[in-house]
Structure formats: structure tokens, C-alpha cells
Image: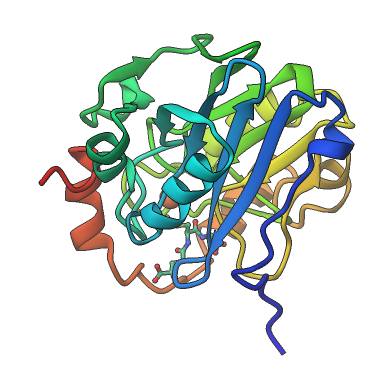
Amino acid sequence: MMLRPALSSIRSLSSCIGNPSFFFRQFFDSETSTYTYLLGDLVSKECILIDPVLEQVARDAQAVQQTGLKLKFALNTHVHADHITGTGLLKKETGCKSVISKCSGAQADLYLEPGDEIKFGQFDLVARPTPGHTNGCMTYVLNSQRCAFTGDALLVRGCGRTDFQEGDAATLYDSVHGEILSLPEDFTLFPAHDYKGWTSTTVREEKLYNPRLSKTKDQFVEIMNNLNLAYPKKIDLAVPANRVCGIQD
Ligand SMILES: N[C@@H](CCC(=O)N[C@@H](CSS)C(=O)NCC(=O)O)C(=O)O
Ligand SMILES: [Fe+2]
């Protein structure tokens, strides 16, 4: 039987991440197996969303409102191929600003370059470029809470495919080893998707157990070139829409 987190499995790591001012929720969209993350500062009330899904904007906006937070930024880790981002609609509904890497070529209010910081209250995410799944993939590192949001560059016991958009397996291997698995081993890693029931992992676990990335670069390229995955169902709709930050009207 395929294990999937239920829609109701909204996770709070506030207690184990330590700082009582840090608000954290992980949401799951069961149709596309996409994780969206809400991160907030309970003192300043500023919050951000990472990888919102269009069909879940009402859920995300309600969570922001219920917690008394104010949405500052809606970020994407990359131009998604499997779903339309919620950033366009969230901008309209909440007045937040959309954010994506400059290198993605997509439209947004703010463009990130390597090393740029996204601040919400006392917290800041650092953007690390992790191309290979797409050219514009960014991993967002929250050093104070010892965690990172890896988009599709690194999935739990897997990684993003490299057979469309600007995919390149050798580039992805270098990105993940250079920018993610080089983080301290206890860092928690949160992916943009999961298809097997995982919710998060750690640098240490992926170095030990990732069946693709624990191999040599040549072995990794061979594995990635033979995945033979089905094309994402919504790709022809999603990629053009996400290049303009989702739905605008
Ligand atoms: N069946 C889904 C698409 C599944 C898929 O291709 N996922 C991507 C991430 S979304 S771009 C991926 O990289 N998967 C890696 C893997 O090993 O599964 C659909 O039709 O949308
Ligand atoms: Fe993707």
C-alpha cells in the first residue's frame, strides 16, 4: 500500500526547532504531492510561504490569517512543472510580494541572486543556487533553525528528475553535494515533493541512505538517464503559467 500523508497532517516543528518565536507549518497538496511551508516570526508577525499551490491558496491564506501573521513574501524554489504556483493569487489576495531566482527567467516582484537573504522579522533565509533539475532552482537555508528547503533539488531518498526544462544530472550532483549535503549533518531538510510518505530528512540521513546521491557522479548520471518517468500531467499548462508567477487575474 502506498503511504501518503493525509491532508490533515499539518506539521508543527516549533517545539523541536527551539525558538518559541518561530512559527512553522508544513502543508501537503495530495493531488500533486507538493509541500508548502509557512514560516513566521510571532514577534514581528511577518511570515513567508515557500512553494504555494494555486488550488491551496485558500488554505494557506486562512492559516496566515488565523495565526495573526502578515504575509510578506511568497517564494518559489523554481519554475514548477507539475502544478501552478499560488504566488500570483496570493499577491492579489494579500498584497505579498512574489520571489524567485533571477536565473529562473520567471517573472516576480523580487529576484534572488546566490547568497541573497529573505528576511521575515528576526529570521532570514539564505538563497543557495542548486541548478540541475532546472537552471533557476534555489535552496533556501534557515541557519538559525538548522534547516533548509530544498525544492526539487533534493527529495527524501531521491532528487528532482533531469529529463526536461534545463535538467542536467551532472550539474544536479554538483549542486546537491556542494550546496546541500555540505551543510552540517544535523540540518533538517524539507523537500518540495514526496511520493512515498516521507515528510523531512537530514543531511546525515541523505548522505548515508539516498540511493542516487550516495553514489559516484558517473553512477548518478547513469541512474538519472534511465529513470524513464512519465511526463508530468500538467506540464504544458504549468510551466508557461509559472513563468509569469501563476494566475494574474
Ligand atoms: N506524476 C507527477 C509528476 C512526478 C514528477 O515527475 N515529479 C518531479 C518533481 S515535480 S517537477 C520529479 O522530479 N520526480 C523525481 C522522481 O524521482 O520521481 C505528475 O504527473 O505531475
Ligand atoms: Fe520541479
Relative to residue 152, is residue 71 drawn left or right?
Answer: left
Residue shown at 79% from the left, 42% from the top: 13
Residue 126 in the image, given as x and y percentages of width and height: 58, 16
Residue 123 in the image, given as x and y percentages of width and height: 65, 15
Residue shown at 53% from the left, 9% from the top: 115
Please tell me how many numbered marks the rendered image carries: 0
Quadrant of the rendered structure where residue 151 is? top right
Q: Is residue 115 visible?
A: yes
Relative to residue 212, is residue 97 drawn left or right?
Answer: left
Q: Nearer the viewer, residue 99 or 170?
A: 99
Q: Is residue 184 above or below residue 68?
A: above
Q: Is residue 173 visible?
A: no
Relative to residue 234, is residue 46 drawn left or right?
Answer: right
Residue furthest out toward the left: 249
Instruction: State the colouring used for the structure image.
Output: rainbow
Q: Nearer the viewer, residue 232 or 242?
A: 242
Q: Nearer the viewer, residue 168 or 131?
A: 131
Q: Is residue 176 above or below residue 60?
A: above
Residue shown at 79% from the left, 47% from the top: 201
Relative to residue 200, is residue 140 drawn left or right?
Answer: left
Residue 42 in the image, given as x and y percentages of width and height: 66, 25
Q: Nearer the viewer, residue 192 or 95?
A: 95
Quadrant of the rendered structure where residue 172 is? top right
Q: Which image quarter holds the N terminus?
A: bottom right
Residue 91 in the image, given as x and y percentages of width and height: 27, 34
Residue shown at 82% from the left, 31% from the top: 187
